[in-house]
Amino acid sequence: MFEALSFPFIQNALIAGVLVSLASGIIGSLIVVNRMVFLAGGIAHTAYGGIGVAVFLGLPIFLGASVFAVAAALIISMITLKHRERMDTFIGLMWAVGMALGVVLIDLTPGYNADFMSYLFGSILAVSQSDLYFMGGLLGMIVFIMIFWYRDILAVSYDSEYANLRGINVQFFYTLILILSALTVVVAIKVVGLILVIALLTIPVYIAEKLSNTLYMMMILSGIFSSIFTLIGLWISYEYDIASGASIILISAVSLFLFLGINRFK
Amino acid sequence: MSIIEIKNLSFSYDKQKILENINLNVEEKDFLAIIGPNGGGKSTLLKLILGINPVKDGSIRTFGEVPKKNLSQIGYVPQNTNVNTDFPIKVIEVVLMGHIGTKRPLFGYAKEETMCAMGALAQVGMEKFANERIGSLSGGQRQRVMIARALCAHPKILILDEPTSSIDVDGQKQIYELLKELNAYITIIVVSHDVSVIMKYATTVVHINKKLTYHDMSGQHSDAPNRCNHFCEVEMFNKFREVK
């Protein structure tokens, strides 16, 4: 296994795995405490439309996916403001249309049919140097925002009505959380793929929630758990030659069941 | 001067009248109880006083100004404190939310803010629980924490929406005893269903069902139904009291 570490693409995969795990630990915590898991799912699948557009026009994949994901986040934020009770309908709509658009555009792209699966199930071994910069930059931005606005984000997440009374701009922070979720979803697609993104954003977070007394502790623990699961998953996928995204998620799920079992008999 | 003055206030939502021609004055150190049926407009009135809903018809003045200007003078304890009990947050962090955006450091919490929050917790007898997770407390304890959060900004008025709706009987009594203590220096406004408890602590009771009716608690033993022939639980309790 150790000779594998000398390959640049393996090194890139390991770095990407850790960067994305830390980002998804922080953002996943926010998504879970704000009950936004379904929204994140909607954003992820809408992003697939952006991947289709990018492939069709020959643009960078991250760019297309990011633009679509952020647009989805902004739309969701607007809907929450005006038609909260119809939210699930609109998200279901975006979810399906985004996917359909992506599939059609990739079909229409001449000579292109290879990498379709890689967006659905991740392609961490194909992470490039510039992908790493994007991931690192995003993680840096998330950490900075969390440190700077921690108490506002905490107040909005815990009790938005009260936060509003205390003069905090609830809509702004809600939108900010959604946009950061969108960008995190985009980088997580690279690691575990569109379909498994939600598992990466929730499984480590769920374990961390049970072990933490504060939101920042939950974020840190989620990041650590997520990194461990990702690294073990990668190693298993290399050893047994199976898909990395799926093996990362299965390792996470097995750990979750172990955790729940141990918790129960304690 | 009354600290809250409401004149000819009406409020409609989707063309449906919720409040009609409300007139109400709250004086300093009053203990005002607002009772009335569900959907009668109690919570709407609170939202208007807190500046969450805009006043369109009539006027509300808190400390002589429009409600939005004096939010820092009013502490608010919202209705349901049992939401989000899974949230990983410590009691002290909940209380710290009561601070307003002034004098805050670049990140984290200033020392004075933490001291002040601990003080508020001590006021409600919860200082020992500062580092507990909020979800591990009982309903009554959590309600005390929410009161501490409201006290954190040193308000002159404390407004509570159904503070005892999800608390057992002992807990309810403790909450009202606490409010009575606080009433020595803070004006208290409570929305409640619980007439029997309210009767014991409130100095003024108003009944709201679209319109507002006063029940002056000083004239508890008057026979006649009050001014506008309104007869509700308050009169009934007074009758019972006379029989005893």
Image (cartoon, rainbow, N blue to C red):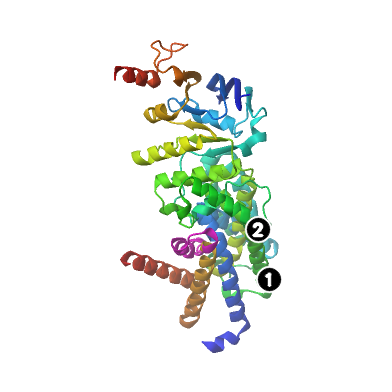
Spatial separation of the CA atoms under disc 2 and disc 1: 27 Å
The region drawn magenta spans: A194-217
Residue under the image location 59 percent in, 41 percent down: B154
Residue B230 position (above or below residue B28):
above
The image position of residue B124, as x and y in percent, is 47, 45
Q: Position of residue A70 (x, y in %)?
A: 64, 54
Compared across the picture, whether B59 is left or right of B135 comes to right
For residue B126: magenta?
no
**Circle 2 is placed at which residue position?**
B107
Amino acid on which disc 1 is placed: Tyr
In the picture shown, does residue B226 fall above or below B44? above
Q: Determine the chain carrying the residue at label 2.
A: B
- Residue lying furthest front in this view? B184
> Looking at numbered disc 2 in the image, what kind of residue is underneath it?
Phe
Instruction: Report whether residue A55 is seen.
Output: no
Residue B205: percent from the left, percent from the top?
A: 46, 24
Q: Residue drawn 40% across and 21% down?
A: B234
Quadrant of the rendered image containing residue A23 = bottom right
Residue at point 62%, 47% (across, down):
A75
Please tell me whether residue A202 belongs to the stretch shown in magenta. Answer: yes
Q: Main secondary structure of the magenta part?
A: helix
Pick the front one: B130 or B123: B123
Mark 1 lies on residue: A133
Q: Do the CB atoms of the residues marked 2 and 1 lie less than 8 Å apart?
A: no
